[in-house]
Image (spheres, grey):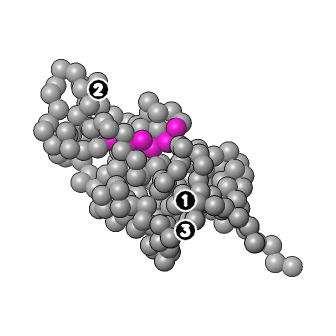
Amino acid sequence: MKISSPSYLKHHFLIAMPHMGDPNFAQTLIYLIEHSADGAMGLIVNRPSGLSLADVLEQLRPDEPPAALCQSLPIFSGGPVQTDRGFVLHPNDWQFQATLSLGELAMSTSQDVLFSIADGQGPERHFIALGYAGWEAGQIEAELADNAWLTCPADDSILFDLPYDQRLQAAAARLGVNLSLLTAQAGHA
């Protein structure tokens, strides 16, 4: 008898199914930063918060006016957990005070990454979010079994290059799925 090891979804997208009832996750695309037997952590990548990097910098560096480019850099709502904490995804060739390597990507949580981006000296490709989405051990597996999510390997071009309102459909299209053709009713055969 062959024993199979669990399949974890780190560096995958979670695509919310149309029947997702939780308003925190309805119509979301989530980048999974970590997924293991202990649980999972991810960032919603298609829900802007209405804040810009300039708004955040006004709090972090009140004596220094933010550069004009900061007005056009959106901050996203990464999820309902720790909504006052910032997370920045960027290519792994950048290191800051608090940077975690995720393979091709990295995640930084220290203020220096924001200052570097604001000053035009940081990574050009970046995604900035406040808060994250978290799941306890076994929770995401149960949601997958209930058909709450589709999954596919993450694509950096969807994350960094597409407008936020095109990301969900683009990820689904990688699977050959048109979400608008799916019903909002869930079921099991």
Q: Nearer the viewer, residue 174 or 122?
A: 174
The magenta segment: 75-80
Q: Nearer the viewer, mark 1 or mark 2?
A: 1
Is 94 or 178 nearer to us in this picture? 178
Position in image of residue 49 (x %, y %) = 36, 39
Residue 52 percent coordinates (x, y): 27, 38
Q: What residue do we see at 40% from left, 52% from top?
A: 46
Please, what is the three-letter code of the amino acid marked with disc 2? Leu
Q: Is residue 79 left or right of residue 64?
A: right
- In the rendered structure, are the residues bearing label 3 and label 1 in contact, judged by CB atoms less than 8 Å apart? yes
Residue drawn at 65 percent across, 49 percent down: 39
Is residue 38 something that shows in the picture? Answer: no
Q: What residue does disc 1 label? A: 18
With 178 as the anchor, is 65 left or right in this view? left
Note whether 114 is above or below 62 in the view shown.
Answer: below
Q: Earlier in the sequence, mark 3 or mark 1?
A: 1
Q: Secondary structure at mark 2?
A: helix
The circle drawn on residue 182 is 3
Quadrant in the rendering for residue 4: bottom right
The residue that disc 2 covers is 60
Is residue 100 shown above or below 130? below
- First along the sequence among labels 1 and 2: 1
Number of numbered discs overlaid on the protein picture: 3
86 with respect to 13 (left or right): left
Label 1 element class = loop
